[in-house]
């Protein structure tokens, strides 16, 4: 199975809330993707501030990347707003770049591997049940994988194996981290719509 389903999953996960004089709502849909890769934040930025923090993190780097950002982004942004004396624009740019820096840090490998493992378990459970996360009709299997999809699957298996090993050790050497990053980038290129040997599909 490649990066896309034969039929989109259109069931939605919706929520709403309020703080101060702000009311908000959000809704997430998996769409054509094999797994729901995105995460979001919708909450008050700081208690009593009256300002909201609304963000969508696209999981094209894998579910673990969007989960990592959801967990750490608000804290990093708050620290930078305070350091920059309330300059939101500068603080946003710095916080976004900090997410990349943190995910490249070998000391974070075990944490990211754990998130990747949790995402894989969720995906496996969904495939066994044959139904989308939020209920609804079973997911129709995609056509037989192409040569490109098989290659991507093999590289992805290698990445998952390396992540599991890193989680056990608790860290990676700089060389191991670089090799792992190259493999992850290769998987993304293989699964990109229009890639040679891959399938076609629309982004979610």
Image (cartoon, rainbow, N blue to C red):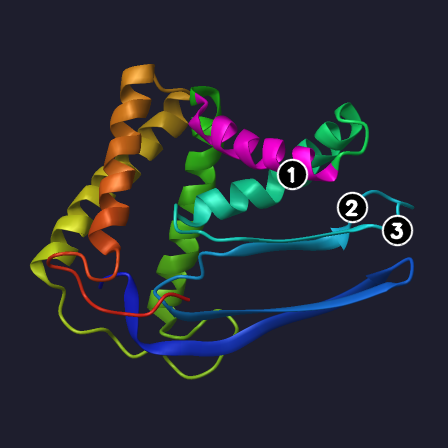
Name the N-terminal-most of marks 1 and 3. 3
Q: Position of residue 147 (x, y in %)?
A: 7, 58
Q: Image point 39% across, 48% down: which residue?
A: 62
Which of the labelled discs sits on residue 57, or is there none?
none
Residue name at image x 34 percent, y 33 percent: 163
Labelled disc at residue 45: 2
* First reached walking from the N terminus: tag 2 or tag 1: 2
Front label number (1 vs 3): 1
Query: Of residues 129 and 6, which is closer to you in this image?
Result: 6
What kind of element bears circle 1?
helix
Magenta stretch: dominant SS? helix
Q: Secondary structure at mark 2?
A: loop
Q: Quadrant of residue 203?
A: bottom left
Please report contact status of discs 1 and 3: CB closer than 8 Å, yes or no. no
Q: Residues within 10 Å of mark 1 (few under 14, many from 20)?
A: some
Residue 94 location in percent, x, y?
61, 31
| Residue 49, placed above or below residue 8 | above
Name the side, left or right, on which 144 lies relative to 50.
left
Would you identify the image quadrant in which residue 184 lies? top left
Residue bounds of the magenta highlight: 88-105
- Provide the residue designation for mark 1: 92
State the separation of the CA atoms marked 2 and 1. 13 Å
Residue 44, how many percent across, how many down? 80, 51
Residue to which mark 3 is pinned: 50
Q: Is residue 34 shown above or below 56?
A: below
Horizontal side of 52 relative to 110 (left or right) equals right
Q: Is residue 111 above or below residue 141?
A: above
Q: Residue furthest bottom?
A: 137
162 left or right, relative to 9: left
Do the residues bearing badges 2 and 1 touch, measured as CB atoms within 8 Å? Answer: no
Pick the front one: 108 or 94: 94
Quadrant of the snapshot with the N terminus: bottom left
């Amino acid at each position: 199975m490649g990066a896309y389903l034969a039929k989109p999953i259109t069931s939605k996960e919706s929520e709403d809330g309020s703080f101060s004089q702000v009311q908000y709502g959000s809704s997430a849909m998996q769409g054509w993707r094999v797994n729901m890769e995105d995460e979001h934040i919708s909450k008050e930025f700081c208690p009593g501030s009256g300002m909201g923090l609304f963000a969508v993190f696209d999981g094209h780097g894998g579910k673990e990347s969007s989960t990592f950002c959801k967990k750490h982004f608000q804290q990093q942004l708050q620290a930078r707003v305070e350091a920059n004396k309330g300059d939101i624009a500068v603080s946003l740019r710095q916080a976004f770049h900090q997410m990349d820096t943190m995910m490249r840090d070998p000391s974070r490998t075990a944490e990211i591997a754990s998130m990747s493992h949790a995402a894989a378990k969720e995906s496996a459970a969904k495939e066994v049940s044959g139904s989308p996360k939020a209920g609804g009709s079973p997911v129709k299997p995609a056509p037989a994988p192409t040569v490109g999809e098989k290659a991507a699957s093999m590289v992805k298996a290698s990445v998952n194996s390396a992540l599991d090993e890193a989680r056990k050790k608790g860290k990676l050497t700089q060389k191991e981290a670089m090799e792992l990053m190259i493999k992850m980038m290769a998987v993304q290129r293989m699964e990109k719509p229009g890639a040679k040997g891959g399938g076609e599909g629309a982004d979610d």
